[in-house]
Image (cartoon, helix red, strand yellow):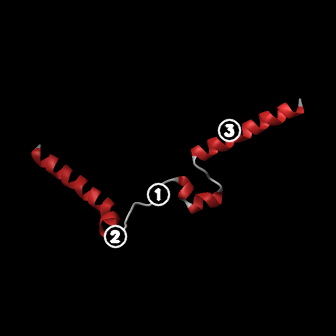
Amino acid sequence: MVGKIIIITLIIAIAVAFLCVKVIFRRNGSFSSQHIHDSEAMRERGIHCVMDQDREMRTRSHLAVSEKRQKN
């Protein structure tokens, strides 16, 4: 039982070390952003994050409502 816990802890420690290699060994190292709006490929395809899509739809719906009010 203790042997399994030691092996599992060692595996987790190695995984964390591999994840942190870039941050530890580079000057000003940091993890790259995982947000959709920071990805150039996603921007080229016109894909936005949910927050941006929600904001865009809310402004569109407000514009549609104000246009209907102006017509009446």
Q: CA distance from mark 3 to mark 1?
A: 26 Å
Counting from the top left corner in percent of width and height, residue 47 is at 62, 53
Q: Residue at x 77, y 39 (%)?
A: 63
6 left or right of 37? left
Query: Quick one: label 2 or label 3, which is nearer the N terminus?
Result: 2
Given residues 36 and 26, the one toward you in this image is 26
Q: Position of residue 39 (x, y in %)?
A: 55, 59
Q: Residue at x 73, y 36 (%)?
A: 62
Q: Considering depth in this image, is 67 or 5 the residue closer to the camera?
A: 67
Other-residue count near label 2 (Cα within 10 Å), few / some / many at <14 / 14–19 / ≥20: few
Residue highlighted by disc 3: 58
Badge 1 marks a residue whose secondary structure is loop
**CB under 8 Å between callouts 2 and 1?**
no
Question: Can you name the residue that lies furthest to the top here?
Answer: 72
Q: Looking at the picture, does residue 3 appear above or below residue 31?
A: above
Relative depth, front residue between 2 and 49: 49
For badge 3, the amino acid type reads Arg
Label 3 sits on a secondary structure element that is helix
What is the number of the mark on residue 33? 1
